[in-house]
Amino acid sequence: MTLEGILIFLLVGGVAGWLAGLVVRGGGFGLVGNILVGIIGAFVAGFLFPAVGISLGAGIVASILHATIGAVVLLLIVRVLKRA
């Protein structure tokens, strides 16, 4: 992976984590935490979307949407586990 690819990966993760933090109240974890939540959210979406036959297309905007939806799912799971 090139330096440019890593930077885009981190940027998409950061934006997705930040957006997910806005959607799920109390979900913000700071810059590094948001990047991690966004990256993990992208992996979650990568497993969930093909399983249910969903595709939002290709490109940077679709990547951010996928990662954001996955991050929201991740934050909701974390919230449920914290309450238990």
Image: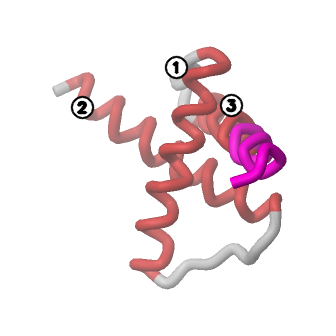
- Badge 2: residue crowd in 10 Å (few <14, some 14–19, many ≥20): few
**Disc nearer the start of the sequence (3/2):** 3
> Residue at (23%, 24%) from the top-left corner?
83
The majority secondary structure of the magenta stretch comes to: helix
Which residue corresponds to mark 2?
Answer: 81
> Residue at (62%, 78%) from the top-left corner?
55
* Highlighted range, magenta: 1-11
Q: Are marks 3 and 2 in contact (CB under 8 Å)?
A: no
Q: Quadrant of residue 18?
A: top right
Q: Secondary structure at mark 3?
A: helix
The image position of residue 64, as x and y in percent, is 72, 53
| Count of residue discs | 3
Q: Residue 18's mark? A: 3
Front-lying residue, 27 or 9: 9
Amino acid type, label 1: Gly
Amino acid type, label 3: Trp
**Disc nearer the start of the sequence (1/3):** 3
* As drawn, 41 above or below 52: above
Which residue corresponds to mark 1?
Answer: 26
Q: Are marks 1 and 2 in contact (CB under 8 Å)?
A: no
Q: CA distance from mark 1 to mark 3?
A: 11 Å
> Is 43 left, or right, of 82 in this rendering?
right
As for residue 23 lying within the magenta part, the answer is: no
